[in-house]
Image: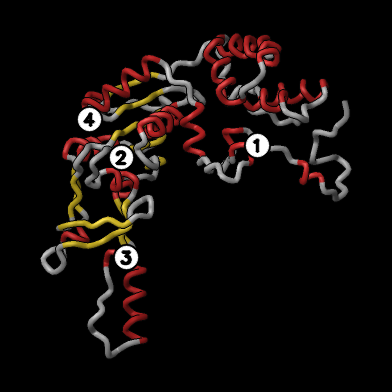
Amino acid sequence: MSDTWKIFQKDQEPHSGIENLPAPPPWRSFYANKKQDNSAQKQSPEEIKGKTFKVWDKQVELVNAALYLRRPLLVTGRPGTGKSSLAYAVAYQLQLGKVLKWSINTRTTLNDGLYRYDPIGRLQDSQLKNKTDKTDNTNEIDIGNYVQLGALGTSFLPNEKPRFLLIDEVDKSDIDLPNDLLNIFEEGEFEIPELARIAEQKTTITVTTYDNQKAKINQGRIACQEFPLVIMTSNGERDFPPAFLRRCLQLEMPQPDQQQIKEIVQSHLHLEPDILAELENLIENFVQRRERGENLATDQLLNVIFMLTGNKNPSPTDEKILLEYLLQPLDRIRGEY
């Protein structure tokens, strides 16, 4: 076989090979059309994740328990075990609308999830208005134009059906955030002080939501009608306070076994049975390496199989190199390529 699968070459000469770039993997297709049918609706990345995730019995039990009990579900597991994908699968099946995703880092505070107020933008617009129209005192600057709800705040808006809130990698937060979350989960409501202060002058104010809709806020307070379905993911990098854990349901995401991995591969790539059979040794070797303690994610295996089963698959020499580089343990970094 030749290097025809390689779009980027060693010779550095300009060429038009990018025009031959094949379709992306399903999990990296940001808007996939069904069979190029113009009448087919486009699928969002969320829908693709939701449709291809393989749900197992324990996950079904605990998601249903979280729905019935109106309690957050804390999903813990190593990277690549499908913690976030579970959330998209639930939202897809239950038709709960767009997943409200709140990604956590070490600087995240509770207010980041509730709402954002832009006082500087409001001041600048007020000054500009005064300069351009000094005679018109009737149209005041609407404070609602400078308030946008975060994912957490949007999920607590009154709705007949619960919204779906994904709090991703909550274990990366600072020490105070879990307890702050605990308070709002118990109360089911929160206040926006900037709006509450002017409630006597203006009872109802329209603000923008996380998903760019409009919502009316009364008296500067938001209280949920139906408690949102909350899934929080954690890579297990820290312990949480007992009070926080006591008010959550907990799900540990196991590493999938060999049969489950085959099901995952098939749900994503829809391979012919004979091709899937040829991958048996690769999948078995992957599982054995992980059982020996190597930190490998299922995503890595999917990447390899996609490369090996495409229309322009690599030569045997390149296949060996790709296997080595794409299936490196996540906690090992090699400096030579």
Q: Quadrant of residue 293?
A: top right
Question: Dot 3 lies on which element?
Answer: helix
At label 4, the amino acid type is: Arg
153 in relation to 332, above or below: below
Residue at the image point whose x is 22% and y is 46% from the top: 158
> Looking at the picture, how far across and down is residue 249, in whole percent?
28, 23
254 in relation to 5, above or below: above
According to the picture, the residue beneath numbered tag 2 turns out to be 163
Mark 2 and mark 3: Cα distance apart in space: 23 Å
At label 1, the amino acid type is: Pro
In the picture provided, is 205 more to the left or to the right than 50?
A: left
The answer to whether the residues at label 1 and label 4 have Cβ atoms under 8 Å apart is no
How packed mark 1 is, by other alpha carbons closer than 10 Å (few <14, some 14-19, many 20 or more), is few
> Looking at the picture, how far across and down is residue 263, in whole percent?
55, 16
Say which label, 1 or 4, has the lower sequence index. Answer: 1
How packed mark 2 is, by other alpha carbons closer than 10 Å (few <14, some 14-19, many 20 or more), is many
According to the picture, the residue beneath numbered tag 4 turns out to be 70
According to the picture, the residue beneath numbered tag 3 turns out to be 145
In the picture provided, is 37 more to the left or to the right than 312?
A: left
In the picture provided, is 308 more to the left or to the right than 331?
A: right
132 in relation to 300, above or below: below
Residue at the image point whose x is 51% and y is 27% from the top: 52
According to the picture, the residue beneath numbered tag 1 turns out to be 24
The answer to whether the residues at label 3 and label 1 have Cβ atoms under 8 Å apart is no
At label 3, the amino acid type is: Asn
**Which of 56/75 is in front?**
56
Q: Image quadrant for the C terminus? A: top right
Q: Is residue 102 visible?
A: no
